Image (cartoon, rainbow, N blue to C red):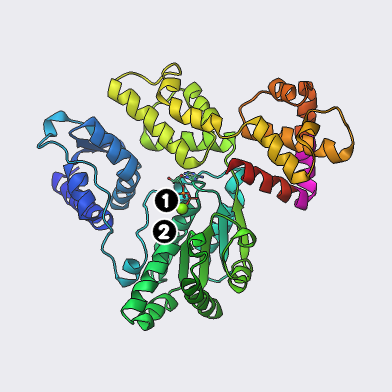
């Protein structure tokens, strides 16, 4: 391959990265990479330190690969090599990426994270519905449900999905204008416009978009003036057939401090819930991240992390990063033995999160039975059912084994617990109001 062609490509990719990630990120990280070679469908770039390598791989690797495949479709992979001889000055401390300069509409919104695309969103039972709904919105110009309302606990992928929708539309239909921003930012812009008596251009900017995405709307709870403005913007856009996508940590019905008319507007499109992670999803996400980073992690270690870090995906990512950083720093392979030590804080936090006693207490309160009934031998339906729900939640939310759970419920056998879990799963599948009840309890216990 001709050197000049390669160099020109590399320059174009670098210029693009600079544009997308901003001057700060460019100076700190991106211009410290150098092109090594392109061979066998792989782009190899070199950086002076291992730390820089990790940083580049996790934050920019996928984007660099994508940009390069656009230049040369033969290239499908990227490798980052460490070449200490490239070191110039001491590396500057990590700086947050600056907002990329874009056109006005983009500036009005918030920057999109290039890692948050559909391609790197792992789909599993807890998020498949939200994912499907988001894809539908991203792939169609016609509005099918308005708004799309995504909700779920913190760190479960709402922002990721919203960015993915925005990226997808930008790539598929670049003429459509998309604004993505947080509700906080919306409020901030609005207050600023009020102060500068510039509400007209504020309104115009929002009302001229094709797709408006507002993240974390729970932030405008109790902020009456912002809600009012949001409500009008919302209605104006819906009336003109523009698409709106909203996220929040709760469903419209559960959102507190939101005016009734706005609440009912929010809930009148499609409401899609992202549920707590399951073991399978966590393992899937770990596998995907490992593959993206191009590193080797023993199966047992991946399983251990998926088993122990039961919180949200953000916790999971940080645990994984910690394991990788640690083993690279001490220069050892990742082994199962070293993990508990590296992750002991996270594991403790995650184990501590829910106890069986807490579950029993909350479930008893919820169904208005006595905590003692959780241990008692009474079989009347009105106490047996709550007890089964508590056993089910104990299995779902703690790391306790079936026999351990049985013991905590008045010394019952593990088969009783197994039966309870099955029973509740069956009921959830056939009775949606019961399913909601259990879901609500789970949320209450987890938070
Ligand atoms: P939320 O907005 O719901 O608080 P985020 O979208 O910020 O959560 O997700 C937290 C982190 O977890 C992000 O880095 C995101 O990329 C990652 N993440 C969440 N869900 C998934 C998933 N299904 N597949 C891959 N990464 C995920
Ligand atoms: Mg978010």
Q: Residue furthest top?
A: 337
- The residue singled out by tag 2 in the image is 167
- Name the image quarter holding the N terminus: top left
Q: Is residue 109 magenta?
A: no
- Name the image quarter holding the C terminus: top right
Q: Residue 335 appears in which quarter of the rendering?
A: top left
Above or below, 72 against 291 in this view is below
User: Where are the magenta residues, as a range?
Assistant: 422-434
Q: Nearer the viewer, mark 2 or mark 1?
A: 1
- The residue closer to the viewer here, 126 or 202, is 202
| Mark 1 residue CB less than 8 A from any atom of ligand 1 | yes
Q: Residue at x 31, y 72 (%)?
A: 104
Image position, residue 409 (x, y; %): 75, 26
Above or below, 173 against 167 in this view is below
Numbered tag placed on residue 116 in the rendering: 1
Is there a contact, CB below 8 Å, between mark 2 and mark 1? yes
Q: Residue at x 33, y 77 (%)?
A: 195
Image position, residue 47 (x, y; %): 20, 36
- The residue closer to the viewer here, 292 or 24, is 24
In this image, 411 relative to 134: left or right?
A: right
Name the main secondary structure of what is drawn in magenta.
Answer: helix
Reading the chain from its start, which is encountered first: label 2 or label 1?
1
Q: Residue 429 appears in which quarter of the rendering?
A: top right
């Amino acid at each position: 391959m001709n050197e000049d062609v390669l160099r020109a490509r590399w320059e174009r990719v670098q210029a693009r990265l600079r544009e997308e990630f901003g001057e700060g990120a460019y100076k700190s990280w991106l211009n410290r990479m150098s092109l090594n070679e392109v061979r066998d469908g792989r782009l190899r770039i070199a950086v002076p330190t291992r730390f820089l390598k990790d940083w580049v791989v996790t934050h920019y690797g996928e984007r660099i690969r994508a940009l390069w495949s656009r230049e040369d479709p033969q290239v499908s992979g990227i490798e980052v090599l460490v070449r200490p001889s490239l070191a110039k000055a001491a590396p500057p401390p990590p700086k947050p990426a600056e907002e990329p300069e874009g056109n006005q509409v983009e500036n009005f919104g918030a920057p999109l994270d290039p890692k948050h695309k559909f391609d790197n969103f792992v789909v599993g039972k807890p998020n498949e519905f939200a994912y499907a709904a988001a894809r539908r919105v991203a792939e169609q110009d016609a509005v099918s449900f308005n708004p799309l309302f995504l909700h779920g606990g913190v760190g479960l992928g709402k922002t990721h999905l919203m960015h993915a929708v925005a990226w997808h539309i930008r790539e598929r239909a670049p003429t459509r204008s998309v604004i993505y921003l947080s509700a906080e930012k919306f409020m901030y812009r609005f207050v600023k416009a009020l102060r500068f008596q510039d509400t007209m251009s504020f309104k115009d900017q929002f009302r001229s978009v094709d797709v408006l995405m507002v993240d974390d709307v729970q932030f405008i709870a109790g902020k009456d003036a912002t809600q009012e403005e949001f409500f009008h913007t919302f209605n104006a856009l819906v009336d003109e057939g523009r698409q709106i996508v909203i996220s929040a940590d709760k469903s419209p019905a559960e959102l507190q401090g939101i005016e009734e008319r706005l609440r009912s507007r929010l809930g009148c499109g499609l409401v899609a819930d992202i549920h707590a992670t399951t073991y399978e999803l966590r393992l899937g996400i770990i596998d995907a991240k490992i593959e993206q980073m191009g590193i080797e992690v023993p199966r047992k270690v991946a399983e251990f992390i998926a088993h122990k870090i039961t919180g949200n995906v953000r916790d999971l990512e940080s645990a994984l990063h910690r394991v990788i950083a640690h083993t690279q720093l001490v220069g050892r392979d990742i082994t199962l033995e070293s993990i508990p030590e590296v992750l002991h804080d996270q594991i403790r936090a995650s184990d501590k999160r829910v106890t069986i006693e807490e579950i029993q207490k909350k479930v008893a309160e919820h169904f208005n039975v006595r905590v003692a009934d959780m241990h008692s031998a009474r079989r009347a339906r009105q106490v047996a059912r709550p007890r089964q729900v508590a056993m089910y939640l104990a299995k779902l939310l703690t790391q306790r084994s079936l026999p351990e759970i049985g013991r905590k419920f008045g010394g019952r056998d593990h088969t009783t617990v197994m039966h309870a879990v099955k029973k509740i799963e069956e009921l959830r599948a056939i009775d949606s109001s019961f399913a909601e009840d259990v879901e609500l309890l789970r949320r209450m216990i987890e938070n």
